Image: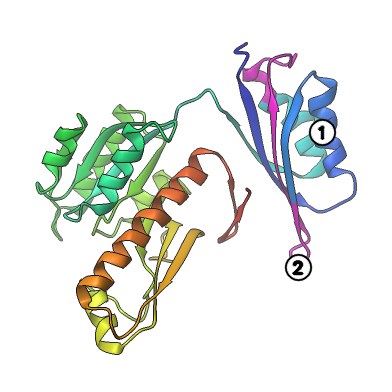
Amino acid sequence: MNNNAHAIILISSPDRPGLVAAVTDFININGGNIINLEQHVDKQENTFFMRIEWDLSNFIIPKEKISDYFQTLYANKYNMTFRLYFNDHTPRMAVFVSKMSHCLFDILARYTAGEWKVEIPLIISNHEDLRWVAERFGIEYHVLKLNKDNKDEIEAKQLVLLEEKKIDFIVLARYMQILTDKFIESYPNKIINIHHSFLPAFVGARPYHAAYERGVKIIGATSHYVTTELDAGPIIEQDITRISHRDSVENLVRKGQDLEKIVLSHAIESHLKRRILVYKNKTILFS
C-alpha cells in the first residue's frame, strides 16, 4: 500500500453515546494511525457529524474492502451515512464558462502553480470568447451553443463529454446558463457555483450597476453547490467587503470580481480536501 495514502470518512448519524469511540476503534484495531479528527453535534437536529482521516501505511483492511467492512460492522449498527475518500486519488474537474474570464484565470493560475491536487481535462463554454485562455494553458475547450430550443440536446452532449473525461465534479466559473434538473441530478453535490451576494435584491446582467445606484455599503460573493432550486443550494463559502459613496461602478465590479475569485477558490479547495459534509440543504465545513 502507498506509504503516503490516507483515508477520509465523512459521517452523519443520529446522535448517541459511543460514536467517536466506535469509529476510532475501527481504525485502531485495524492498524490505522489517526491524523485528524473533527466532530460536531447539531442539538436541534440531534445529529452527529464527523470527519476523520487516518494513515493507511499499516492498515490491514485492503482499500477496496474498507467501505464494506465499515458499512457492515459500524454504519448499519449506528445508522450512519458515510462517504469514504482516499487522498491518493486525483479528482478530475471540468470548468464551465461563458464570457467573463476572472474566475477562470484564477482557477487555472492555481492549477498551474500546483496549489491543488486536481486535473482539469476540459473547459466547456457556450461562447468562443475564452478559447484563447484554454489554449494558453493547454486545456481542451469545447463550445456548445445553447438556445431555448436545444438545451436538452446540448446538455446531453455535455454529459457525454464529462463521462468520456471521467469528470468527478464541475465548477461553474461564471457560466451564465441555468442547468436543467436532469443535468444537476447527474452530479449531486458535485457542481460548484459562484455568484455575487446581492441576490435576490439585484438580479440580471448588471448587478453592480444596480447596487451602485442604490448606494449599497457591502458587497459580497457566495459559492454553493447547485441544486434544482435556483441559487438555493448548500452554501460552501462566503465573503464580503465594505464599499462607500467614493467607489465608482468600476470599483464595485473590480472588488466584486476579486471576492468571487477568492470565494470560489476556497470552495474548490474545501471540496478537494473533503472538508464538506452536506446535510439536508446546509453544509458542515470542517477545518
Is residue 48 in the magenta section?
yes
Q: Is residue 67 above or below residue 81?
A: above
Residue at the far top in the pictured view: 1
Give the quarter of the image for residue 255: bottom left
Q: CA distance from mark 1 to mark 2?
A: 25 Å
**Which residue range is magenta in the image?**
40-66
Residue at image location 78% in from the left, 61% down from the top: 46
Q: Secondary structure at mark 2?
A: loop
What is the x, y in percent for residue 72?
A: 76, 29
What is the x, y in percent for residue 164?
A: 29, 27
Q: Label 1 neighbourhood size at 10 Å, few (<14), some (14-19), many (20+)?
A: some
Q: Which mark is residue 217?
A: none
What is the x, y in percent for residue 59?
A: 73, 17
Three-letter code, disc 2: Gln
Which image quadrant: the N terminus?
A: top right
Q: Which mark is residue 44?
A: 2
